[in-house]
């Protein structure tokens, strides 16, 4: 892969790098968003488990369609 200039390959400009890397949103923003999501999942853990189990009971209790088995 040496001599890429012979194939017309050029280095990206700073603007192109920012556009490809996802814009100008700082990485800490995405880390904060992920941390907030994870915190909310664990803060409402009992409610989330109850909702999951209710959906599972609905799936296993149906007689029509696919007979989902866990």
Image: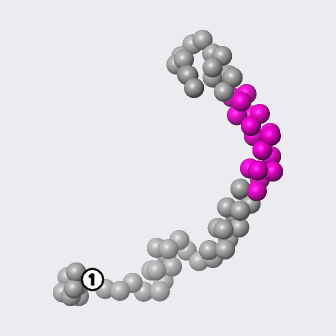
Task: Identify which residue is drawn at 76% across, 50% down.
Answer: 42
Q: Which residues are magenta?
A: 39-55
Q: Main secondary structure of the magenta part?
A: helix
Task: Identify which residue is drawn at 50% across, 74% down.
Answer: 21
30 with respect to 1 (left or right): right
Please say if 22 is above or below 63.
Answer: below
Residue 30 at x, y percent in the picture: 64, 67
Answer with the quarter of the image where residue 24 lies: bottom right
51 with respect to 26 (left or right): right
Please say if 16 is above or below 59.
Answer: below
Can the viewer see residue 65? yes
Residue 3 at x, y percent in the picture: 21, 88
Q: Residue furthest front?
A: 70
Q: Is residue 49 found inside the magenta-colored segment of the image?
A: yes
Residue 68 at x, y percent in the picture: 55, 22
Q: Residue furthest top?
A: 63
Residue at disc 1, secondary structure: loop
14 with respect to 38 (left or right): left
Q: Which residue is mark 1?
A: 9
Task: Identify which residue is drawn at 56% across, 22% down.
Answer: 69
Task: Identify which residue is drawn at 67% across, 61% down.
Answer: 34
Pick the residue in front: 2 or 12.
2
10 with respect to 22 (left or right): left
């Amino acid at each position: 892969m040496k001599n890429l200039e012979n194939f017309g390959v050029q280095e990206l400009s700073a603007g192109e790098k920012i556009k490809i890397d996802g814009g100008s949103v700082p990485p800490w923003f995405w880390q904060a968003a992920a941390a907030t999501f994870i915190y909310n999942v664990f803060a409402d853990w009992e409610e989330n488990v109850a909702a999951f189990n209710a959906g599972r009971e609905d799936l296993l209790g149906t007689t029509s369609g696919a007979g989902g088995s866990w």
